[in-house]
Image: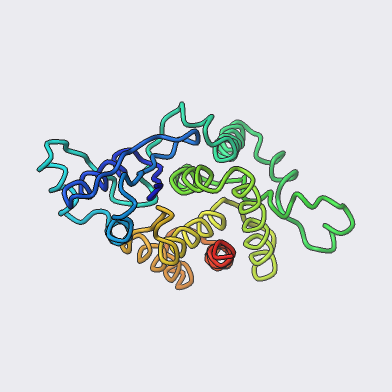
Amino acid sequence: MKLVGFASQPTALLLANYLRKQGIAVEVNEDASGTFVLHLVDSAQADKAMAITQEFVSAPTHPKYQQAAWDSSEQVSLVKSGASAIAFNPKQLLGVPFTSLVLLTCAAIYLLSLFGGFEFFANALMITPFSQLTESGQWWRLVGPALIHFSALHIVFNLLWWWILGAPIENKFGTSFLVIFMLITATVSNVAQLVVSGPNFGGLSGVVYALMGFVWWVGWLKPQWGLSLPKHLVGFMLVWLVLGFADVLWVSMANTAHTAGLVSGCLFALLLTKLSKR
């Protein structure tokens, strides 16, 4: 009986060790998508195993899980973020093609921009007022600003979170889902920013906030899916959002895009979990 799946092997082993300590026999196997799945040996223990699993997903960094690993002489280290328990490995690029495509595209555009290509990419991708969009028919500009970044800190922050959150989502729900998610949330956040502040902005952060909102709410609504965002990261995300609106940071923030992205990601999670019940 399949119990739960994780993008990270150490996370899966940590839970498996704890379950075995509680007298629940489980096996850990890697499936074709690279997810590490826990299988329950005795289905009669399903209720107890599921309760422990839900508790683990809500607080995976609790010391009792590491203690169980030590007691079994199988020490396992766990990345603090439940959603970020997937470390970067070049071989994983092929396993998450859309996550990799967006990451490499943003990186290539930024690097080429440093060598004089910024004006070209800005002219080709930046969003324009609706009147111009209607006349030109260049609807890709609704998404285009997400691919353009203005500083090293800007792109490193966005691509780090895109990889940490996007790869597990693509593994869990498939490439088509992440494509649709990215296109919709990028469009929503970019259009919102255009309406409120005009066309001069860029960056993947609207989509990143959508990913954070999605993982946050999925972890809350469906913890058995194995995706979660620790409370301290949720707090950081919300505080950063408030600081952006307070205009006390040293950088100019696309606050409306961040807010619209966060809300759209949460709504995506709500819709998906509701549909899963059907």
- The residue at the point 75 percent across, 49 percent down is 140
* Quarter where residue 60 is shown: bottom left
Left or right: 155 with respect to 21?
Answer: right
Left or right: 143 with respect to 246?
Answer: right
| On screen, residue 105 above or below 146 | above
- The residue at the point 59 percent across, 33 percent down is 108
Q: Nearer the viewer, residue 235 or 181?
A: 181
Residue 3 visible at all: yes
Residue 155 visible at all: no
* Quarter where residue 235 is shown: bottom left
Coloring scheme of the render? rainbow
Q: Nearer the viewer, residue 99 or 28?
A: 28
Question: How far across and down, in percent of the image, does residue 98 sit?
Answer: 59, 39
Q: Quadrant of the C terminus?
A: bottom right
* Quarter where residue 230 is shown: bottom left
Question: How far across and down, in percent of the image, does residue 92 sit?
Answer: 47, 31
Residue, far top: 91
Q: Nearer the viewer, residue 185 or 21?
A: 21
Question: How far across and down, in percent of the image, does residue 59 sit?
Answer: 27, 59
Residue, far right: 135
